[in-house]
Amino acid sequence: MIPKTRFFELVEEYCMDALNQQEKIEFETELKSNGELSEEVKFEREMQMAISEKEVLNLREKLQTVAKQTRSGDTPFDLLEDFENIRQLTETLPPEELLKFYDSLPKAHVYQHELVSNENIHEFYREQEKSAFDNDALFDEWDDDEIEFEGLDEALLEKDILNLRDTLNKVSASVREQCSVEEIDRYLNGELTGQELERFEHELKVNSILQREVELHREVKNALLEVDIMNLRGQMAHLMKTETSWNVSEQQIEDYIEGTLEGAELESFLFEWNENAGLRAEVNLRKNVEKALEEKDIFTLRDKLTGISKELEGREIKSLIPETKVHSLHWWRAGVAVAVILLAFAGLFRNEFGNINHTYNQYYQPPEWAPQRSVTADLNVLQQANGYFTAGEYDKALLLYEKAIGENDEKFVFQFYKAATLQNLEKYEEAIPEYSQVITHGDNMFVEEAQWYRALCYLKLGKKDVAREQLVAIMDKNGFYKNDAKAIIRKMKFSMR
Amino acid sequence: MKNYSDEQILKGILRHDNLILQYIYKQFYYQVNLFIKKNSGNEDDANDIFQEAIIVIYRKLKENDIVFEASSFQGYLFSVCRFLWLKQLEKLRIEQEKINDSLPFQEDVYDDNLVELVEKNERYGLYQKHFKTLSTDCQKLLQLFFEKVPLSEIARIMGYKGEKYAKKRKFKCKELLISRIKQDTEFKKILEDDT
């Protein structure tokens, strides 16, 4: 049997009449009995002809254009512009057509070789073009037919190369597909045998893309076996997310702020303080918290203000003004700010206050009501129910939500508020599955909040591990509650173990 | 805070001891952070570099290839961090001559082996990153397979109908993984660097 690459060489040589007498006779005998071969020969002939003929055609057309344009006295640049239209005709064979015939691997290789040999010509011409370009000034002066013709010729070749490059890309892409993941996998597992194995190994020797592919598969396999490294990486990432990055104790920070840190301790503290931005931020935060706690008057004022905006919030909800969300968010953020300060305060006297309920109360703010988050939900029911909700008549609200869940497609809206109501009623165990449904639904704007409130429910129920897991997940999502989640986790480490 | 000896630290890294890892982070991170921020990096970069440096050291430990002659763990860690960041800067085409060296590093750490190891770590890290994006099903299946668990056993563990399905599913998972790796721009960069 003739090897495939040789096969195509033979066809090519036969068509170009480059075979010796004996080979030719053998080939022709084969040709008569072998349909595939004769098709191949026919194609090769056609291709050769097409390629050569198109060039002739182009050349002829080009010559005509050049003659015409020179006669009408156009500049060489106009000439090139006009040439744009002709370029369409200069294309040899469209890549798809070539690919249709070149469907086997060796063929693609042979073709690639041809492409590469053409590219060499291209380089040669490009050098020439460069020197011609350098002589641009001369170009303008010499209104010579021959020079113009040269420029066109180069441009034509350039177009050719562009097409070929395109084809090359497609061909190489098709080559890549030839060795499927499955095949490589089987090879690496030693499942290939006999002819298959031979073919693969032969291909592997000559095909650098395949070599790289096989290498990649090997490496991926090794990489996936490194369970320890993946664990270590996860552990580090978690640690860096939840740990502080300073190497001084809390006592030292407090002493430093009070001005009682002395001697070597002070020295090492200052050394780190100089370089560690995280530590500086922490010291500043603690200083500010202290200042804030001293301002008792402002504290009470803030409380009052919060109360007032809460009231306003309630009213605005009833009037259903779109601005509700914006306004309430401000209020809400202010609430968080207060909570954070309170938490910091609690942090200072952790031993007295550090318990789950306290954390929960600091962080739990009932969800604000934002009707615009749901597009089609029944606003009437929502409005009514939320009226009860904000007025604290949770039982009535609950009934309405339950009814709405039964009747509406956009269940998650009502599920979320139902869960929030249950949470307000301190029925945490019942709230959790409702939140879970909102989260599982996934495609709505309540997911993030549902996760946050569900985590708080777990916290309240004393399921610390579940709560921690949820909070870590919230942190990973990098959303609005990220910092709060982080703060709670840190706090849990100290006070709830 | 308790101070650990270099030996304790190394042993701690080997067994992924949380306390030791915490200690390393608290003790050394801020200097690395400062160094990277002084040299066109940000907090995230510092996080990545610090983490990868620990991984590189862990790999070295596993290969039994860490020798502290004139250096200490700190010197070694900083040298690795610095090296990793220089490599990153190279990719970003930032001139390294202007590097603002604030880390006490040691030149002698940069042997050929480290260069090789870091490159391996870079590639493996990328593969592992994409592996982690697969469904847990796929992850488990591939790992079982690579651990040479027999297909029949895999099918049983995963609750598949039979070996044939397990095999088919494995191909699908692997195909997905490979295609994700190939689409990664980082991967393309690594390939470019090789050639």
Image (cartoon, rainbow, N blue to C red):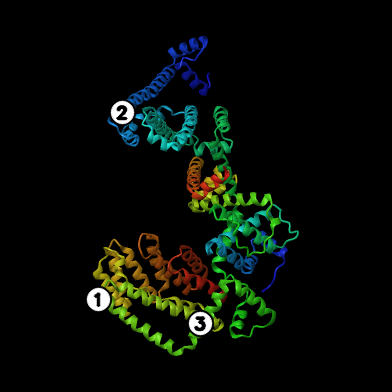
The span from disc 2 to disc 3 (Cα, nearest Å) is: 85 Å
Image quadrant of residue A429?
A: bottom left
For label 2, the residue is A65
Please report, as a chain letter, where disc 3 is located.
Answer: A
Residue A97 visible in rendering: yes
Question: Do tags 2 and 3 sit on the same chain?
Answer: yes
Disc assigned to residue A319: 1
Residue B47 placed where, x, y %? 56, 62
Question: Do tags 2 and 1 sit on the same chain?
Answer: yes
| Residue at 49% over, 11% down | A24
The amino acid type, in three-letter code, at marker 2 is Thr
Label 3, secondary structure: give it. helix
Is residue A209 shown above or below A107? Answer: below
The amino acid type, in three-letter code, at marker 1 is Ser
The span from disc 2 to disc 1 (Cα, nearest Å) is: 77 Å
Farthest residue toward the front? A141
A262 sits left or right of A301 in the view: right
